[in-house]
Image (cartoon, grey):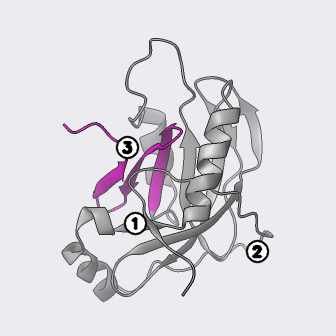
Amino acid sequence: MGRQIAVLAMFGLMACASAGGAQAPKQRGSDAARSNSAAVRAAEAVVVAPEVLEGWRFLYQFITEVEFVLCLEGEQREDGVLYIDGFRLARMEEASISSVRYQPCQGPRYVGTAHNHPPVEGAGNLCYRSVPDRQSFEMDPRAIVDVVLCGEDKHLWVLKDGRTGGRGLDPE
């Protein structure tokens, strides 16, 4: 298999645009599959394709004045691991340096969203989830993962079951 998979630590990059699909997203799996995911170590809970990581890096590097939202595509397998292999831009209605309003993501392979925290001089650590970030994730019953892009090669992810991880994060 010539395609390598990179472990997602927080965000990722890729501009793997895909056509919008039906409104019904892929189901998260059975209760048994979700309970098995507890055995998966946090670092292995989310896997992001290298192309996705590259896309995230590109977008983070060049979209620096406003927040943006990406609809993540992939699947959660029986082993409990979430595989993200694509994304597309959400339909954004309004954006500023500190917020973004967008239409809910659609599609049969939808697994969650990623959004950026644009670089701000002297802002310190951008790898956090704001109250609006947490609220929108909790209100989306189809989302499995919430990702914050907080640097060209840094991201934070959070699963609905509370597990977290990321890439390029400072050790706590």
Q: How crowded is mark 3: few (under 14 residues within 10 Å), some or many (20 or more)?
A: some
Q: Is the magenta stretch mostly helix, strand or loop?
A: strand
- The front one of 167 and 103 is 167
Residue flagged by tag 3: what amino acid is it? Gly
Q: Mark 1 points at which residue?
A: 46
Residue found 75% across the figure and 42% down from its top: 92
Pinpoint residue 108: horizontal percent, then vertical percent. 66, 77
The quarter of the image holding the C terminus is top left
Is 154 magenta? The answer is yes
Q: In the picture provided, is 61 more to the left or to the right than 9?
A: right
Above or below: residue 134 compared with residue 54: above
Q: Is mark 3 on a helix, strand or loop?
A: loop
Q: Mark 3 points at which residue?
A: 168
Q: Give the range drawn in magenta.
A: 145-172
Q: In which quarter of the image is residue 169?
A: top left
Reading the chain from its start, which is encountered first: label 3 or label 2? 2
Reading the chain from its start, which is encountered first: label 1 or label 2? 2
Q: Which mark is residue 21?
A: 2
Above or below: residue 90 compared with residue 108: above
Residue flagged by tag 2: what amino acid is it? Gly
